[in-house]
Structures are given as structure tokens and as C-alpha cells.
Amino acid sequence: MKNNIPSLAQTLPNTLVDIIAWQNTQSVSSDFAPLVEAITQHFSTSLDAVILYGSCLHTSNLAEGIADFYVLVNDYRTAYPKQRYLAYLNAWLPPNVFYLEVVHREQILRAKYAVVSTADFEYGNQFWFHPYLWARFAQPARLLYARDDSVRLRIHVAMAQAVIKFLKSSLLALESQTLDAEEIWTQGLMLTYAAELRAERETRARHLAQQSLQNYTLLTAAALPALMGLLTAQSDEQYLCHTTPADNRRARFHWRLRRWQGRLLSILRLCKATLTFRDCLDYAAWKIERHSGIHVEITPMLRRHPILWGFKVMWQLLRRGVLR
């Protein structure tokens, strides 16, 4: 597979891959280093890469937040030499999600990391129907560790494919109109948020688009040659979206399917997280309260039966509109 990567990279706009590569070299807080070191020691020879994404990428505040990493491994079996069931779970429904704490300079640094094979990372960012991967990695991220230059290139190419997949899937659902990069990415992020069980409000999508607007403006312009006439550059950083009513109907049907698929996948991943993610209930409650202001009580019954009782709590949150 590695031998095919250079030819695959040639099918993408070179400028887009270059922007992704530049983006991945931007500096981050030194506080992430102890967490990355702990991950590299844990996965040893099976580790291909460590990628930082999410809110801590923007704030670099680990005193109150939890860092989000994607850990790319070359093989699930070598990643879990003594826990074969984890390898099966990871291959069946990637990723596996784990929790990590590291004491550094009398401070506890916390991280959540998702494990996926490099091959699944490449395939998912280009071909998955559901946006679970490509919605995340079309957004800014930082490659904090790569095994070698070959792996580094594979990740840059996969992230570039995520941008193309995100833009094509989003633009097809929009009516033919003139809009700018902020509106393109805001609308796209709103669609991808709706495809998962998330507590974030719709205003979160616009905030993210505005927060990284310079980056999204560069990515949109660089991706233009690969969008097959869906988008035409106008003056003053405006774009004309070329879609037909048939495009819209088909794309919106696809997004409805993704929404239902996302609910099923979210439930399955939450069930799986009870086997891999220490204190997953506390983390989920913290995240819901952080984004919605709604407090979720972790009862003794919920701790004893997290899957069975969790369905009841999830249903209550869906009815109240906390999860969408």
C-alpha cells in the first residue's frame, strides 16, 4: 500500500497537500509532549503516528481540558499483543477510545485517544459514507509524531482527501448560490454535527469556521481543482456553487441516511467505550454539561449497568433536545 501513495498524492492538487503539510508543522504547547511520549512508549513498534485535534489544539489549555489524539498503528494485533479482543473490536468498528493521565511538573495532564490503523485512516477519510473520520480531519490538526517520511506523506494525503470529501459532500447539499469559505464550512460542519449524537449547538459550527477561517479559506481555494465544477471562484473570495435540484435531493437523502447511521454507530461506539475507556461515564457527562449546560447525574445504577441504563439516559437527552 505504501508504494501506491505517491501516485495517489498526484491525483490531488499539490497545493492542497502542501497546505496540509504546512498546517501539521505549526507549533503547539510543550505540555502535549509528555502525553505523546506516554503513547509512543505504550504502543512501541506498532505506532505509526500521533495526531492532535479538537478544542485543546486551539486553546492549548490542559489544566481544565482533555487533549484529543488519534493514534495510528500499523496493525491491530501488534497494537494489542496481550488483549486480542481489543484488536477484534478495533477492526470491527474503529476506533477504540482510551483515557490517559500523565503527571508532569506536579500537574495532571489528561487525554482521550482513539486508535485506528493507518490503512483504515486512509480509507475512511476518502471512502467512508459516514463523516466520522473525514469531518474531523478536514478540520485543523497537528501531526505530533510520525514513524518516518513515508507515513508522514500518507497522513498528509489522507487529510487532503478528507478536505475533498467534506467539501463535495457538503456542497452537493447546498442550493446553487454565491457564498464564501466561512459559509461553506459552517454549513458543512452543521451537516456533519447532525450526523452524530452530539451535545454541541449549531452556533458551535459557525464559531469553529470563524476561529480557523484563514485556514479554511486556504483549503477551499486549494481544493478547487478537485471539486469537479461544483465550485467556481468569483471576486473578493466569493464562490459560486453549481448544483442542481437533483443534486440537492440526492445529497440531502444521503445526509438523512448518515444521520440515522450516525445514531446507530454512536450507540455502538458508546457501548464499546465502556470496555476501553476508563471513567467514560464521567467524561460523557462532563462533555454534555460543557456544551449544553445540562447536568447529567451519574447514579450508582448507571455505573453498575452503563450500557442498559445508558440507553435510558440517552433517550431522555434526545427527547429534551440535548443530544441531536
Image (cartoon, helix red, strand yellow):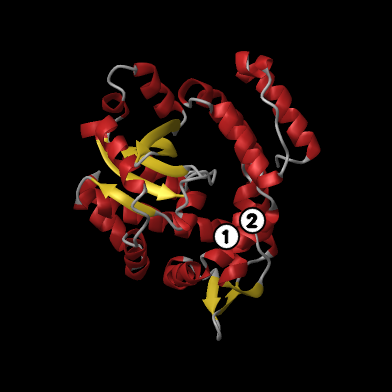
Circle 1: is it few (<14), some (14-19), or many (20+) Cα within 10 Å?
A: some
| Secondary-structure class at tag 2 | helix
Q: Residue farthest to the right? A: 320
Callout 2–callout 1 Cβ contact below 8 Å: yes
Residue 304's place in the image compared with 89, above or below, is above
Q: CA distance from mark 2 to mark 1?
A: 6 Å
Q: Quadrant of residue 75?
A: top left
Provide residue 118's location: percent of width, then percent of height.
32, 41
| Residue 204, label in figure | 2
Quarter of the rendering occupied by the C terminus? top right
- Between 252 and 281, which is closer to the camera in this rendering? 281
Number of marks: 2
- Between 186 and 12, which is closer to the camera in this rendering? 186
Provide residue 297's location: percent of width, then percent of height.
70, 27
Going by the numbered disc 2, the residue's amino acid type is Arg
Q: Residue at x 44, y 31 (%)?
A: 99
Residue 239's place in the image compared with 90, above or below, is below
Q: Residue at x 45, y 52 (%)?
A: 137
- Between 100 and 216, which is closer to the camera in this rendering? 100
Going by the numbered disc 1, the residue's amino acid type is Leu
- What residue is pinned by disc 1? 208
Q: Residue at x 45, y 54 (%)?
A: 60
| Secondary-structure class at tag 1 | helix
